[in-house]
Image (cartoon, rainbow, N blue to C red):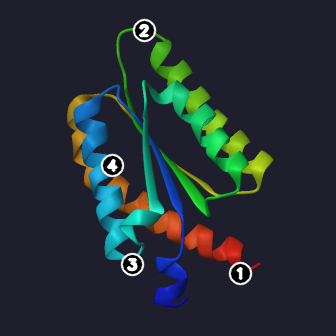
Amino acid sequence: MSKEDIQNLKVGVVFSRFNEPVVREILKSCIDQLVFKGIKKNHILKKEVPGALEIPVLVNAYAATKNYDVLIGVGAVIRGETYHFEVVSDQSANGLMQVQINNNIPIINAIITTNSSDEAFARTKIKGKEAANGAIEMALLMKNL
Protein backbone atom coordinates (compact mmCIF):
# COMPACT_ATOMS: atom_id res chain seq x y z
CA MET A 1 0.00 0.00 0.00
CA SER A 2 1.48 3.28 -1.07
CA LYS A 3 1.02 6.68 0.50
CA GLU A 4 -0.71 7.72 -2.72
CA ASP A 5 -3.25 4.89 -2.31
CA ILE A 6 -4.06 6.11 1.19
CA GLN A 7 -4.19 9.84 0.46
CA ASN A 8 -6.71 9.31 -2.34
CA LEU A 9 -9.18 7.40 -0.16
CA LYS A 10 -12.52 9.09 0.42
CA VAL A 11 -13.92 8.60 3.91
CA GLY A 12 -17.34 9.50 5.25
CA VAL A 13 -17.83 9.84 9.01
CA VAL A 14 -21.33 10.05 10.46
CA PHE A 15 -21.39 10.90 14.15
CA SER A 16 -24.11 11.36 16.75
CA ARG A 17 -24.83 14.40 18.85
CA PHE A 18 -26.12 12.30 21.78
CA ASN A 19 -23.45 11.83 24.48
CA GLU A 20 -21.61 14.63 22.69
CA PRO A 21 -18.55 14.96 24.99
CA VAL A 22 -17.67 11.28 24.48
CA VAL A 23 -18.45 11.29 20.75
CA ARG A 24 -16.39 14.45 20.20
CA GLU A 25 -13.30 12.70 21.64
CA ILE A 26 -13.80 9.57 19.51
CA LEU A 27 -14.36 11.71 16.43
CA LYS A 28 -11.26 13.83 17.05
CA SER A 29 -9.09 10.75 17.60
CA CYS A 30 -10.47 9.14 14.44
CA ILE A 31 -9.97 12.20 12.21
CA ASP A 32 -6.51 12.87 13.65
CA GLN A 33 -5.46 9.28 12.86
CA LEU A 34 -6.91 9.39 9.33
CA VAL A 35 -4.91 12.54 8.62
CA PHE A 36 -1.80 11.17 10.35
CA LYS A 37 -1.96 8.10 8.09
CA GLY A 38 -2.09 10.35 5.03
CA ILE A 39 -5.70 10.90 4.07
CA LYS A 40 -6.30 14.39 2.74
CA LYS A 41 -8.55 16.49 4.99
CA ASN A 42 -10.72 17.45 2.02
CA HIS A 43 -11.36 13.72 1.42
CA ILE A 44 -13.02 13.33 4.81
CA LEU A 45 -16.73 14.12 5.08
CA LYS A 46 -18.14 14.65 8.59
CA LYS A 47 -21.89 14.75 9.18
CA GLU A 48 -23.81 14.91 12.45
CA VAL A 49 -27.06 13.14 13.32
CA PRO A 50 -29.11 13.25 16.53
CA GLY A 51 -28.26 9.81 17.94
CA ALA A 52 -26.85 6.35 17.32
CA LEU A 53 -30.06 5.02 15.78
CA GLU A 54 -29.90 7.69 13.08
CA ILE A 55 -26.34 6.85 12.04
CA PRO A 56 -27.20 3.84 9.83
CA VAL A 57 -29.71 5.69 7.63
CA LEU A 58 -27.28 8.50 6.78
CA VAL A 59 -24.42 6.02 6.32
CA ASN A 60 -26.72 4.11 3.96
CA ALA A 61 -27.47 7.27 1.97
CA TYR A 62 -23.75 8.00 1.59
CA ALA A 63 -23.01 4.37 0.70
CA ALA A 64 -25.62 4.51 -2.06
CA THR A 65 -23.80 7.45 -3.70
CA LYS A 66 -20.75 5.22 -4.34
CA ASN A 67 -18.59 8.31 -3.68
CA TYR A 68 -16.80 6.89 -0.62
CA ASP A 69 -14.29 4.10 -0.16
CA VAL A 70 -15.25 3.53 3.46
CA LEU A 71 -17.73 4.94 5.97
CA ILE A 72 -17.44 5.20 9.74
CA GLY A 73 -20.25 5.50 12.28
CA VAL A 74 -19.21 7.23 15.50
CA GLY A 75 -21.39 7.33 18.58
CA ALA A 76 -21.71 6.43 22.23
CA VAL A 77 -24.42 4.42 23.94
CA ILE A 78 -24.08 4.50 27.70
CA ARG A 79 -26.16 2.17 29.88
CA GLY A 80 -29.03 3.85 31.66
CA GLU A 81 -31.77 2.54 33.88
CA THR A 82 -33.94 1.14 31.09
CA TYR A 83 -33.79 -1.54 28.41
CA HIS A 84 -33.41 1.23 25.79
CA PHE A 85 -29.60 0.85 26.02
CA GLU A 86 -29.74 -2.66 24.53
CA VAL A 87 -32.16 -1.66 21.79
CA VAL A 88 -30.02 1.27 20.67
CA SER A 89 -26.71 -0.59 20.78
CA ASP A 90 -28.07 -3.70 19.05
CA GLN A 91 -30.05 -1.91 16.37
CA SER A 92 -27.38 0.65 15.50
CA ALA A 93 -24.82 -2.15 15.06
CA ASN A 94 -27.28 -4.24 13.05
CA GLY A 95 -28.13 -1.23 10.87
CA LEU A 96 -24.48 -0.60 10.04
CA MET A 97 -23.93 -4.27 9.24
CA GLN A 98 -26.90 -4.26 6.85
CA VAL A 99 -25.58 -1.17 5.06
CA GLN A 100 -22.17 -2.79 4.69
CA ILE A 101 -23.52 -6.01 3.22
CA ASN A 102 -26.20 -4.41 1.04
CA ASN A 103 -23.87 -1.81 -0.49
CA ASN A 104 -20.64 -3.81 -0.62
CA ILE A 105 -18.70 -1.04 1.11
CA PRO A 106 -16.79 -1.32 4.37
CA ILE A 107 -18.53 0.31 7.30
CA ILE A 108 -16.57 0.76 10.52
CA ASN A 109 -18.64 0.64 13.68
CA ALA A 110 -17.17 3.12 16.15
CA ILE A 111 -20.34 3.33 18.23
CA ILE A 112 -19.11 2.41 21.67
CA THR A 113 -21.41 0.79 24.21
CA THR A 114 -20.41 1.08 27.83
CA ASN A 115 -21.82 0.76 31.33
CA SER A 116 -20.79 4.26 32.40
CA SER A 117 -19.41 7.59 31.25
CA ASP A 118 -16.10 6.72 32.92
CA GLU A 119 -15.81 3.56 30.81
CA ALA A 120 -16.74 5.54 27.71
CA PHE A 121 -14.11 8.24 28.26
CA ALA A 122 -11.48 5.56 28.93
CA ARG A 123 -12.09 4.14 25.43
CA THR A 124 -12.49 7.28 23.31
CA LYS A 125 -8.97 7.83 22.03
CA ILE A 126 -8.22 4.18 21.30
CA LYS A 127 -11.61 3.59 19.65
CA GLY A 128 -11.18 6.55 17.31
CA LYS A 129 -7.69 5.45 16.34
CA GLU A 130 -8.80 1.83 15.83
CA ALA A 131 -11.71 2.97 13.68
CA ALA A 132 -9.42 5.04 11.44
CA ASN A 133 -6.90 2.23 11.07
CA GLY A 134 -9.63 -0.30 10.32
CA ALA A 135 -11.20 2.05 7.78
CA ILE A 136 -7.95 2.47 5.88
CA GLU A 137 -7.20 -1.25 5.94
CA MET A 138 -10.66 -2.26 4.73
CA ALA A 139 -10.85 0.44 2.04
CA LEU A 140 -7.50 -0.69 0.61
CA LEU A 141 -8.50 -4.35 0.75
CA MET A 142 -11.70 -3.62 -1.17
CA LYS A 143 -9.88 -1.48 -3.75
CA ASN A 144 -7.37 -4.24 -4.39
CA LEU A 145 -9.78 -7.15 -4.94
Question: Residue 120 or 134: which is nearer the viewer?
Answer: 134
> Taking 19 as reference, is 128 above or below it?
below
> Taking 65 as reference, is 115 above or below it?
above
- The image's mark for residue 38 is 3
Report the residue that reaches farthest toward the front: 42
CA gap between label 1 and label 2 equals 45 Å
How far from the left and from the top, in percent, is residue 70? 59, 60
* Image quadrant where residue 99 sits: top right
Residue wearing tag 4: 27
Left/right placement of residue 90 relative to residue 111 reads right
Q: Nearer the viewer, mark 4 or mark 2?
A: 4
Q: Secondary structure at mark 1?
A: loop
Q: Amino acid at mark 4?
A: Leu
Residue wearing tag 2: 82
- The image's mark for residue 3 is none
First reached walking from the N terminus: tag 3 or tag 4: 4
Q: Secondary structure at mark 4?
A: helix
Q: Is residue 112 visible?
A: no
First reached walking from the N terminus: tag 1 or tag 3: 3
Left/right placement of residue 34 relative to residue 102 reads left
Residue wearing tag 1: 144
Question: Residue 61 or 88: which is nearer the viewer?
Answer: 61
Q: Secondary structure at mark 2?
A: loop
Q: Secondary structure at mark 3?
A: loop
How far from the left and from the top, in percent, is residue 56? 60, 35
Q: Nearer the viewer, mark 1 or mark 2?
A: 1
